Amino acid sequence: STQPIVYSFQSTSNLSDSLAEYILKAQKESIDKRGRFTIAISGGSLPKTLTALIKKSGVKHIFYADERIVPLDHEDSNHKLAYDTLYSHVPIPSDNIHTIDLSLQNDLEELADAYEKELIREFAQKDSARFPVFDLILLGIGPDGHTASLFPGHELLSENDRWVAFIEDSPKPPPRRVTLTFPVINHAARVAFVATGVGKAQILHDILDTPEIGLPAARVRPVAPGQLVWFVDDPASAEVKLA
Ligand code: 6PG
């Protein structure tokens, strides 16, 4: 697996500009190669740094790295957050935005299976690959080192088979969620983490300087030729040594 590349910025607006460039380059490469750009995005403060998705059009298919099992217009919904911060500013055909099917919310296994089928439809032209290859997966981190809805010590850390899994015991509310699994994240062409603020300094040090501890975010190691990039600000990277 590849070593992470860490880009640190003085301000979040510099970070956001640079992330925009990175996304547009990824988009161009993907569209040149296969005529579409398929990405997975996360919640938290991430969507508002995604100016590139607002600035330039192009055939985009958007999935969620994880989603909370709440109505799509609920404050806790990652889709609602992305809608408010991104889609309301840019016309993305709703067929290209892949949300969870809440009619299945009483059976999370079925709901996760349905989202997995949605991925299978998107990546159907995959060759013999056992896992989908996203052009880009954008992730945040929690102060405990979780990413997507992959939490420290959780049994999902060893899920090697499913593409989409569910949990009903998230330590961070809301408890019921679906998430892409590590094999899917680690088969992406590019994975980019975004982390800002002094509140992330200690966990960023733990993730990057002592990956052997095995925090969820440290288990993100795309298989070659996949690329792993961190976009962080100086307060977040203040404790990082990165030998
Ligand atoms: C979650 C988290 C997640 C978020 C990280 C980072 O519930 O899984 O909230 O959505 O990406 O916690 O959050 P910030 O980007 O706000 O630091």
Image (spheres, helix red, strand yellow):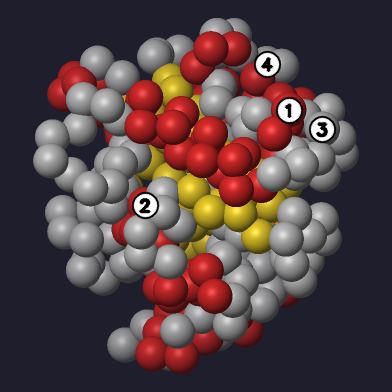
Q: CA distance from mark 2 to mark 3?
A: 25 Å
Q: Residue furthest left?
A: 128
> Residue at 73% of width from left, 66% of height from top?
170
Asked if disc 1 and disc 4 are in contact, CB closer than 8 Å, the reply is: no
Q: Identify the residue position indicated by label 3 in the image.
A: 71
Please name whichever residue, 92 or 29, is drawn nearer the observer in this view of the structure: 92
Q: Secondary structure at mark 4?
A: loop
Residue in the image at 31% along x and 88% along y: 243
Q: Are marks 2 and 4 in contact (CB under 8 Å)?
A: no
Tell me the residue that label 1 is attached to: 103
Of labels 4 and 3, the one closer to you? 3
Residue named by callout 4: 89
Residue 52 to residue 143: above or below: above
Q: CA distance from mark 2 to mark 1?
A: 25 Å
Q: Local crowd at mark 1 within 10 Å, few (<14), some, or many (≥20)?
A: few
Residue at (62, 39) in percent of width and height: 111
Gap between marks 2 and 4 measured at Cα: 29 Å
Kind of residue indicated by mark 3:
Pro
**In the depicted view, which residue is nearer to us: 184 or 43?**
184
Q: Earlier in the sequence, mark 2 or mark 4?
A: 4
Sequence-first tag of 2 and 1 = 1
Identify the disc placed on residue 184: 2
Residue at 53%, 34% in the rendered image? 114
